[in-house]
């Protein structure tokens, strides 16, 4: 294609990168991303999100964060989906300090957490036994006016089911 003077656009590259990442072929996706940059292609938030998701799925959070930094340095702003992907990646490997730091960065950068963000954070916090931090997050959810989010109710029902609802009422 390139040898015939045909230069693929971002949508073309994104389509291939998405499918490679879905197949667990993140290294090949990274190589294609590098080729895209070398021939003057412009990766967009979808390109970066897809690769970051691939790294997170593979447990390669350092590479995902390096890609995030590169993305920001070229002026592509992370959105809620990207933050959710990274936070989920850290929660899966129980690196809650990193997940919490990203959550704070997200809010500081003016990106509003959604029900997925809260769901992932609460799951990670409960899974790692950080019930006090989960309580703090729950209070934040209430203060932000998002207390009606169904996902959080499910977690609270889980606490109730396990006889642990009292932790939310302790000061």
Image (cartoon, rainbow, N blue to C red):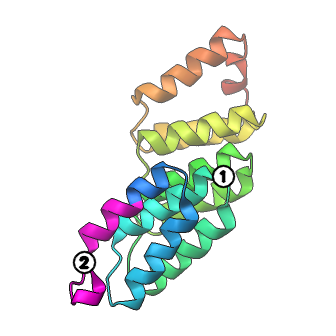
Residue 8 numbered mark, or none: 2
The reply to whether the magenta stretch includes residue 39 is: no
Front in this rendered view, residue 52 or 9:
9
Say whether residue 112 is visible: no
Q: Which residue lies under the disc numbered 1?
A: 90
Q: Residue 130: give x, y in percent of width and height.
A: 76, 38
Where is 108 relative to 166, above or below?
below
Q: Residue 171: give x, y in percent of width and height.
A: 73, 32
Q: Secondary structure at mark 1?
A: helix
Q: Residue 30: give x, y in percent of width and height.
A: 52, 71
Instruction: Report the magenta residues as a range.
Output: 1-17
Front in this rendered view, residue 36 or 163:
36
Distance from the alpha carbon under mark 2 to that under mark 1 = 34 Å
- Where residue 66 sits, quadrant-wise, is bottom right
Where is 124 relative to 105, above or below?
above
Residue at point 38%, 67% (across, down): 47
Front in this rendered view, residue 28 or 89:
28
């Amino acid at each position: 294609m390139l040898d015939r003077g045909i230069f693929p656009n971002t949508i073309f590259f994104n389509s291939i990168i998405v499918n490679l990442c879905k197949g667990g072929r993140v290294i090949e996706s990274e190589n294609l991303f590098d080729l895209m940059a070398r021939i003057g292609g412009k990766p967009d938030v979808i390109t970066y999100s897809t690769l970051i998701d691939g790294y997170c799925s593979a447990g390669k959070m350092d590479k995902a964060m390096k890609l995030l930094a590169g993305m920001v340095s070229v002026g592509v702003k992370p959105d809620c989906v990207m933050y959710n992907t990274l936070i989920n990646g850290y929660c899966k490997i129980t690196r809650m300090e990193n997940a919490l730091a990203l959550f704070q960065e997200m809010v500081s950068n003016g990106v509003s957490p959604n029900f997925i963000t809260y769901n992932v954070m609460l799951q990670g916090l409960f899974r790692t036994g950080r019930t006090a931090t989960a309580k703090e997050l729950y209070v934040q959810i209430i203060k932000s006016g998002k207390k009606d989010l169904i996902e959080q109710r499910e977690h609270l029902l889980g606490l109730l089911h396990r006889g642990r609802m009292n932790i939310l009422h302790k000061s």
